[in-house]
Amino acid sequence: MTQRFTPPEVKGWCPGLFAPMQAKDGWLVRVRPAFGQITAAQATFLAQIAEREGNGLICLTNRASLQLRGFSHNNALHFPELAVLAGLGMANPEQEKRLALLESPLAGADPSCASDTQECAAALRVALCNADILSELPDKFGFAVDGGGLFTVGLLKADITLQTSGAGLWSVVCGNQKSKAAPVQAAVELTIKLAQAFIAIPKSKRPARYPETGKMLFQAVNQLGYPVEIAAVDAPDPALLAGKIGLALYALNAPLGILTSSMLRSCANHARNGDGILRLTPWHSIILHGMSYAPHVADMVDTSTNPILRVSACMGNAGCAQAEGATQALAKTLAHSLRAGESLHVSGCSKGCAHPEKASWTVVAGQSGYGLIRNGTASGPVMRFFPDDRAVEDYFIGTKPQERIMNGRV
């Protein structure tokens, strides 16, 4: 049987506070909270807006942003004004666009995270606000400040990352190159220069996707770069994604990155019994600090043994016009058939937005069924085709599971 995969449209941009995006289930709007943190009051506000003006669904993205779904076009256009008043965005659209900045989620709450992580992130945020030319960067171009700790150095992914080198020093990582360690201000200045060089070089490709770009940018700013060591892991231990993860630190995971307004409101209510802050992670978890008890929120994962923590899935054809099949229910069903250490990605198309990296198993929807990919990405070579989701389920949880566990052979 020949399986056809329609080449998806690559938009090349992400929705932003001032750039809503039309989806199959309505318009979606995005907030990118400063340093990945929102207060309990802001979380309650977003829950109310999601219910009143959207369809009540909120996505926690792999950039630690929140996307509210199901808006009308008029409501989507009005949303930025409300968000800015709530302290969830910059009033200047150009500044807001430049602030694609991730920070270690536990900075200030995890004693093992570099003590100057927040100082470094604040300095970079100011520099990005003041660098008007960086508005010319692609919408998906991102920065990160990685202070390590429980979430070890190397887990945050961005085009340019400041990584702690200890003792108040930071290295700048861009693609496959890394600078010598330097004090915060020098590292921030180099970060801005590299981003400016990216703009100045015609048809530059993002370092996060094309690591060789890093060497070119270091050369462009006359900076000596050193080869970056390949990280041993590219995802956190599931033990850090749900349940108690440290002293008075608790993680609640949104299955497949999907929250309801009631789930977010419940998280806010628990946060008020701690330090009042919800810390968003790129791995679909919300971390609460200062609690004297383990919080429980209905339909959120609060135990690290739940296999859904090793599963990724997009909205599928329920929310995306490019998706050619359902994903969410299938992903939840297949999760329970994973062996220890295996990961799963169920994608509505070959773009693989929910998980650009490799997974142990990737299931991709096509025009006439689903393709199965072993140890690859959503655009990788398909080893087997299935006519529908039921056939996929039978393969994973059928009477002959040995057929799928022997080196991926069928």
Image (cartoon, helix red, strand yellow):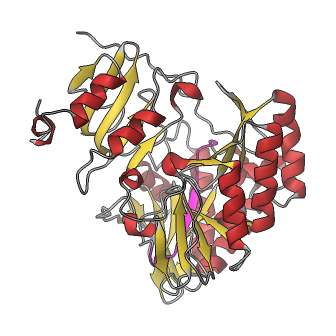
Position of residue 266 measured from the top left corner of the image (x, y, whole percent): 68, 61
Residue 216 appears left or right of 408: right
Foreground residue, 249 or 142?
249
| Residue found at the very far bottom of the displayed protein | 167
Q: Is residue 259 above or below residue 321?
A: below
Residue 314 visible from this viewpoint: yes
**Residue drawn where x is 77% and y is 52% of the image:** 46
Foreground residue, 404 or 195?
404
Residue range corresponding to the magenta coloring? 138-150
Q: Is residue 48 above or below residue 105?
A: above
Foreground residue, 290 or 397?
397
Counting every numbered tag in the picture gives: 0
Residue 344 appears left or right of 354: left
Q: Main secondary structure of the magenta part?
A: loop
**Residue drawn where x is 76% and y is 51% of the image:** 47
Position of residue 1 measured from the top left corner of the image (x, y, whole percent): 23, 9
**Residue drawn where x is 29% and y is 28% of the image:** 392
Position of residue 158 measured from the top left corner of the image (x, y, whole percent): 51, 56
In the rendered image, which quarter contains the C terminus?
top left
Residue 229 appears left or right of 137: left
Q: Is residue 147 magenta?
A: yes
Position of residue 263 measured from the top left corner of the image (x, y, whole percent): 65, 54
Q: Is residue 348 magenta?
A: no
